[in-house]
Amino acid sequence: MPLINEIVNNKQQIQQWRHQLHSIPEIAFQEHKTADFVEQKLKNFGLKMYPRMAGTGVIASLSAGENKKAIALRADLDALPIIEKNNMHYCSTHKGMMHACGHDGHTSMLLGAAFYLSQHKNFNGTVYFVFQPAEENEGGGRKLVEEGFFKKFQIDAIYGMHNWPDLEVGKFAIRSGPVMAAYDVFDITINGKGGHAAAPHKTIDPIVISGAIIIALQNIISRQINPLDSAVISITKIRAGDSYNVIPETAFLSGTVRTFHPHIQKNIIKQLKHIVKSICKTYGATAEVEYQKRYPATINNIVETENAISAASEVVGDNNIIKNSPPSLGSEDFSFLLNECKGCYISIGNGSSASLHNSYYDFNDDILPIGVSYWVRLTQSQLS
Ligand SMILES: [Zn+2]
Ligand SMILES: [Zn+2]
């Protein structure tokens, strides 16, 4: 069974919402205009509205029939602090902010599904529409959980969807188990002894020590982690010194760690701290390591993955579903929701667009009816 005709016929409307949202991008927890827009639409569709959660998060529900079963469909509202370099008529009007991850498209697709389902009520149960803030960096999903989202609403399964550049239009990619990595960050301060660059023997040079640490940290990946497992350590910031002839007192390194399994994450944290402290000690310096776990790994449940595959197959055909697609070392705060409730996160092909978070990226409007049809088929098959 292909796309739902009525949704295809409503594409102009959904696309108009997407363009409107694209023109007013707002970053994490500041999605006020976006949330107002979404809330107004849902009210017009006649959905049951709830008080906002996680600041700017909009929650609504729609029930039909007697079935007590409930599912939640989640979209993300936020944009990124990027200057848009596109020149479509609906470009960002908010300077320095841009929908460069397609959350304008995700929000519009979920609005499209809410509209269709509110018109037809051709399902049996309750569907919650979750428009969460701050997917990028700030963990809006975590905030929803902390504010008791899953205590307030009895939800049997939660589903998420993200567009994926370079995956063809009309295809979905999915797998059960880990799909996105845990995202951690760290800051290292190396305290040496500053002095004249021409008399290094009278100093403890934190820059040379930084070099040793940067190389040694990669040995964690190549020599401490089973080669069949995946993990990444990237140093992404280095800061030290202001002059040609002064060895500075301190150096700062920052970076990120990505893992799929908690035991590997734990091992990396231990090794990272051990290596930094040991190298500093060897050179007579001291170090502080601040390590923060940001997002957990995103792990799809087996049954819900099957549910998502069968709904997507109804829309685009089984041969257009890439099952067992390789996981990404990127991260996603849908993980906080999946930690609390069974569910599944699926990727929808965005075609050959610029990559996510690129200043030339744009969500592909051609996939709007595909995503909306998927949400509707998933709702109908899970609430029947
Ligand atoms: Zn993103
Ligand atoms: Zn995103």
Image (cartoon, helix red, strand yellow):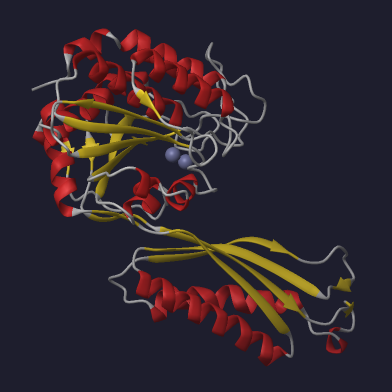
On-image quarter of the N terminus: top left
Q: Which of 218 and 345 is in front in this view?
A: 345
Residue 315 is situated, as x and y percent measured from the top left of the image, at 15, 26
Q: Is residue 215 left or right of residue 69?
A: right
Residue 363 is situated, as x and y percent measured from the top left of the image, at 41, 26
168 relative to 212, above or below: above
Q: Which of 39 and 8 is in front in this view?
A: 39
- Which residue is at 24% across, 29% downward? 375
Residue 9 is situated, as x and y percent measured from the top left of the image, at 25, 7
124 relative to 191, above or below: above
Q: Is residue 211 left or right of residue 272?
A: right
Image quadrant where residue 170 sits: top left
On-image quarter of the C terminus: top left
Q: Is residue 253 left or right of residue 39?
A: right
Residue 140 visible? The answer is yes
Residue 79 is situated, as x and y percent measured from the top left of the image, at 53, 33
- Which residue is at 21% across, 28% downward? 374
- Which residue is at 34% across, 56% downward? 339
- Which residue is at 43% across, 75% downward? 266
Ligand 2 shows up in the quarter that is: top left
